């Protein structure tokens, strides 16, 4: 262990040396032969943790911060902790916290602001005491500010206590001190990796690199582009994409270390502690330019100085206040830019070998600095936190541990661990993180950072028939603890991940858990506010179709299960609960349907069909009820109509709906006509009307006669029952004449010989002709005829491609629609669009000549090189212009091209 800096109180552990400051790294002989695990630096004292769990302290002890009676210039063991195995510690200005292997915290020193968490404001506590209020919480990390304290639990909760003058507790208040640990509620559900505390400000870092800060901000140490204090945690959005993996806080400045080894600093810079070559303060995170090019693996902040270690060079750089030798540069001068710490004189290795010493860990605090050196063969990846200081997440290792227990009742420790993971949103939100590119550090509103395949595999490994006791414990934790406590407004996108992963768990697909788990989970999901729901929609839209379909199938099965229960019979007292369950499940399906539709159909629309509906509900009655609710809104009367969710109806169900609607509309039209006829008997001004729409037509002039009748008819007449009479024939229209009429007139109207439509031999489909002399009325007639046929329950043959129906729905047709109508042309165009610039032989341009009629119909006529050249670079697409010949409508298509020789071949094909 090497140390340098202020030694006036013995805080370097060098014993009774003459110097008050040590200006270059010096070996602390006390630790020769001892294995150091952690070092905590206070303002004027130091605590050292050995790998065997014992704690030593040295330095100032005026307020009991050493945990024993007197000031010590050499490290002395804290004997009151003899019975404990300590795994982590931290020092504040004059208080100390130690964490044992059971997750319990011991505190001692100054307690006047409640920073000891002992529910009092004692001036000083000289013997370590257990913070009993946290005895049931497994704490994994502790951090001390000057007069406040933080703790991170294994379940991801952050606790704070002590002084809150500047909002450094993050509890939404300023001024009052808090003597007992309190959960920071506004951070619930976020998977945290680290906590850090400065003089009067605090930070927390998520597993995926999101940074939250709160507390004092007079120098911009929160990095929020202002100097206003914050009493609630606020995310530093400027660092979201920087892949931050570690945060360190000084008295009034902050340092962030990224996964790539970049260093950002912000806050007070009056002594150069930000490393930007100036003494300016920075209110936004700013990258340390002079460290660029170096991959920094560790940073540490003292009171007003900073250390950074680069493993490739083996160098420690320091900058900031140097008056007490804390920079280790053999000088007491301040440094405004990173400067190498003086290389220490290390003892020779015995026996002599080619091995050398490397820095394992650096520490800083107050005006003192430490570097823990070790032999090269024992070097570890010190950028990774120790296992005992991590959030408890679901992974291969912990699952194997659970599965290794003997069959039967779960051991208490395993039962508690399972309950912790499945009762705590943070644990699940921190599980199944993607390690491939893009990894979870790229988490955003568009990308979840979750490996869904990993989630599926691990859940299926864990929930299996051979271990029912594990499944039962998981189900109980989800039902009683996790789902009821989910917030409708999670504090960060990382708190939304469980909404993606949990439905993959096989427990959700078990009918026995529909009512207790799957439906309550769906209720929590659809209750989310607009912003988080939008993020979830973005994440769902990136799902692979099979993954998305499994989620849809799950809640389709829930709906079927509920409808089957209803058909068997549900007691009236439970009817309202059933209605709520059904409405919840359908609303989630509706949400998924909208996401799929918006994303261009993640899965086909028919995958949402519930084919069992025809057997489980009376579709006609459901439709009538829905119509009544539309006409006479009655608020929420406890009735759910499936017609509100039309996407679940298959073709058979929709046919029934159309028939029901037609029957109702016809009956209304007939009733209105009869009422008018009754009125005409008593009021001569009112004309009598026929309750049916009568078409009297001649076979030889079926189109003209029909147009004549329909022109004279009002829209209301179209809703009356249709009856057809062929002139000169006595047949009564009981349905057969009507069917024959539609067959004949559609054959006439759609026949290509009339020039209204063009027939495509390859696809056997028709499309509007761009060269027709017919009036638009005739096209309108076709629409009316089609409508009348459907309305009167008659099937007509319409050989149009899907593009027609897309246009009716105001949706943009795609190249696939062109392939359906003209397969050869569509395939050739697709090949052209798929060409890449990497294969480009020479630059050239193609001119598409197209026509477009008044119905928005576009047809490719020719595709030939026009001789003009376009410069194409290999990194960008270029744009080909499609120019409509007749009405000059330009269309732009982004293309990638290959070799001209192959292009010529495709031109000939077209």
Image: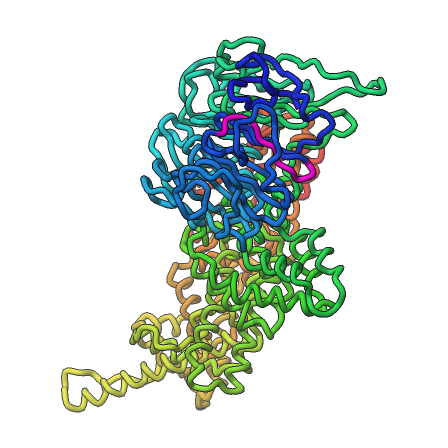
x then y, percent, for residue 473? 62, 66
Identify the residue shown where x is 35% and y is 29%.
226
Query: Is residue 899 in sight in this rendering?
Result: no
Q: Is residue 148 left or right of residue 450?
A: left
- Quarter of the image that includes the C terminus: top right
Vertical arrangement, residue 426 with respect to residue 260, above or below:
below
Identify the residue shown where x is 61% and y is 28%.
75
Identify the residue shown where x is 50% and y is 56%.
595
x then y, percent, for residue 584? 46, 68
x then y, percent, for residue 62? 46, 29
- Quarter of the image that includes the N terminus: top right
Vertical arrangement, residue 142 with respect to residue 591, above or below:
above
Vertical arrangement, residue 193 with respect to residue 735, above or below:
above
Please tell me which residue lies in front, 95 or 608.
Answer: 95
Q: Is residue 523 left or right of residue 874?
A: left
Start and end of the magenta stretch? Answer: 51-61
Please tell me which residue lies in front, 593 or 471.
Answer: 471
Query: Is residue 427 in sight in this rendering?
Result: yes
Vertical arrangement, residue 794 with respect to residue 824, above or below:
below
Q: Does residue 382 show up magenta in the picture?
A: no
Give the number of marks: 0
x then y, percent, for residue 204? 50, 39
Identify the residue shown where x is 61% and y is 64%.
474
Which of the 4 image quarters holds residue 779? bottom left
Please tell me which residue lies in front, 493 or 319.
Answer: 319
Please tell me which residue lies in front, 841 or 294.
Answer: 294
């Amino acid at each position: 262990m090497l140390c340098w800096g202020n030694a006036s109180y013995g805080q370097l552990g060098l014993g009774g040396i003459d110097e008050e400051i040590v200006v270059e790294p010096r070996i602390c002989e006390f630790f020769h032969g001892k294995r150091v695990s952690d070092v905590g630096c206070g303002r004027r004292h130091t605590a050292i943790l050995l790998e065997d769990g014992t704690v030593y302290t040295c330095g100032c002890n005026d307020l009991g911060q050493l945990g024993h009676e007197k000031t010590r210039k050499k490290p002395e063991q804290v004997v009151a902790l003899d019975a404990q195995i300590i795994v982590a510690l931290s020092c504040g200005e004059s208080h100390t916290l130690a964490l044992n292997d059971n997750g319990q915290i011991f505190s001692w020193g100054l307690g006047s602001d409640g920073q000891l968490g002992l529910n009092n404001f004692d001036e000083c506590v000289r013997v370590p005491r257990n913070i009993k209020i946290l005895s049931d919480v497994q704490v994994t990390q502790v951090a001390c500010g000057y007069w406040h304290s933080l703790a991170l639990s294994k379940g991801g909760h952050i606790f704070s206590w002590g002084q809150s003058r500047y909002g450094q507790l993050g509890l939404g208040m300023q001024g009052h001190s808090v003597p007992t640990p309190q959960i920071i509620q506004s951070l619930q559900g976020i998977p945290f990796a680290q906590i850090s505390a400065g003089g009067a400000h605090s930070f927390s870092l998520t597993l995926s690199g999101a940074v939250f800060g709160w507390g004092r901000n007079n120098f911009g140490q929160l990095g929020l582009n202002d100097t206003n204090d914050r009493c609630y945690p606020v995310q530093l959005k400027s660092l979201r994409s920087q892949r931050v993996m570690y945060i360190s806080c000084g008295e009034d400045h902050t340092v962030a270390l990224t996964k790539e080894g970049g260093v950002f600093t912000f806050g007070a810079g009056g002594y150069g502690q930000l490393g930007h070559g100036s003494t300016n303060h920075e209110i936004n995170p700013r990258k340390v330019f002079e460290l660029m090019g170096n991959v920094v693996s560790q940073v540490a902040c003292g009171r007003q100085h900073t250390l950074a270690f680069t493993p490739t060079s083996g160098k420690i750089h320091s900058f900031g206040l140097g008056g007490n030798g804390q920079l280790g540069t053999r000088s007491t001068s301040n440094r405004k830019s990173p400067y190498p710490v003086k290389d220490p004189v290390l003892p020779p290795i015995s026996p002599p070998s080619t091995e050398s010493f490397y820095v394992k860990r650096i520490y800083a605090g107050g005006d003192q600095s430490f570097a823990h050196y070790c032999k090269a063969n024992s070097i570890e990846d010190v950028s990774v936190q120790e296992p005992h200081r991590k959030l408890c997440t679901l992974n291969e290792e912990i699952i194997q541990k659970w599965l290794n227990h003997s069959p039967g009742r779960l051991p208490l420790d395993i039962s508690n661990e399972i309950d912790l993971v499945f009762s705590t949103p943070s644990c699940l939100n921190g599980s199944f993180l993607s390690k491939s590119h893009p990894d979870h550090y790229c988490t955003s509103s568009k990308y979840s950072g979750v490996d869904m395949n990993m989630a599926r595999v691990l859940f299926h490994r864990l929930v299996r028939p051979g271990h029912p006791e594990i499944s039962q414990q998981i189900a109980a934790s989800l039902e009683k603890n996790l789902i009821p406590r989910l917030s409708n407004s999670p504090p960060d996108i990382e708190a939304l991940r469980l909404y993606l992963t949990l439905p993959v768990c096989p427990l959700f697909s078990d009918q026995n858990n529909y009512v207790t788990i799957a439906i309550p989970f769906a209720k929590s999901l659809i209750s989310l506010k607009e912003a988080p729901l939008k993020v979830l929609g973005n994440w769902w839209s990136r799902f692979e179709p099979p993954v998305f379909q499994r989620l849809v199938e799950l809640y389709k099965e829930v709906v079927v299960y509920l409808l089957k229960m209803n058909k068997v019979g549900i007691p009236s007292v439970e009817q309202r609960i059933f209605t709520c369950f059904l409405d919840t499940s359908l609303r989630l399906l509706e949400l998924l349907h909208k996401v799929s539709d918006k994303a261009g159909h993640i899965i086909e629309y028919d995958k949402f069909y519930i084919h069992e509906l025809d057997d489980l509900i009376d579709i006609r009655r459901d439709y009538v009820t829905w119509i009544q609710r539309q006409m006479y809104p009655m608020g929420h009367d406890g009735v759910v109509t499936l017609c509100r969710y039309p996407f679940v109806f298959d073709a058979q169900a929709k046919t029934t709906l159309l028939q029901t609607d037609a029957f109702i509309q016809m009956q209304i039209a007939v009733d209105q006509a009869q009422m008018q006829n009754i009125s005409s008997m008593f009021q001569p001004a009112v004309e009598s009307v026929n309750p049916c729409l009568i078409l009297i037509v001649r076979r030889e002039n079926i189109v003209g006669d029909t147009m004549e009748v329909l022109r004279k008819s009002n829209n209301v007449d179209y809703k009356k029952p249709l009856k057809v009479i062929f002139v000169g024939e006595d047949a009564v229209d009981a349905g057969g004449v009507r069917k024959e009429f539609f067959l004949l007139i559609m054959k006439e109207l759609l026949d290509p010989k009339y020039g209204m439509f063009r027939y495509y031999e390859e696809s056997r489909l028709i499309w509007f002709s761009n060269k027709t002399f017919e009036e638009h009325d005739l096209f309108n007639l076709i629409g009316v005829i089609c409508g009348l046929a459907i309305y009167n329950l008659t099937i007509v043959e319409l050989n149009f491609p899907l593009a027609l129906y897309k246009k009716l729905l105001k949706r943009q047709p795609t190249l696939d629609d062109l392939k359906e109508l003209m397969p050869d042309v569509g395939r050739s165009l697709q090949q052209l669009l798929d060409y890449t610039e990497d294969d480009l032989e020479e630059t050239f341009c193609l001119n598409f000549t197209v026509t477009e009629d008044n119905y928005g119909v576009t047809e490719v006529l020719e595709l030939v090189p026009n001789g003009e050249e376009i410069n194409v670079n290999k990194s960008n697409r270029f744009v080909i212009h499609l120019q409509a010949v007749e009405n000059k409508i330009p269309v732009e298509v982004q293309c990638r091209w290959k070799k001209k020789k192959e292009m010529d071949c495709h031109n000939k094909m077209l």
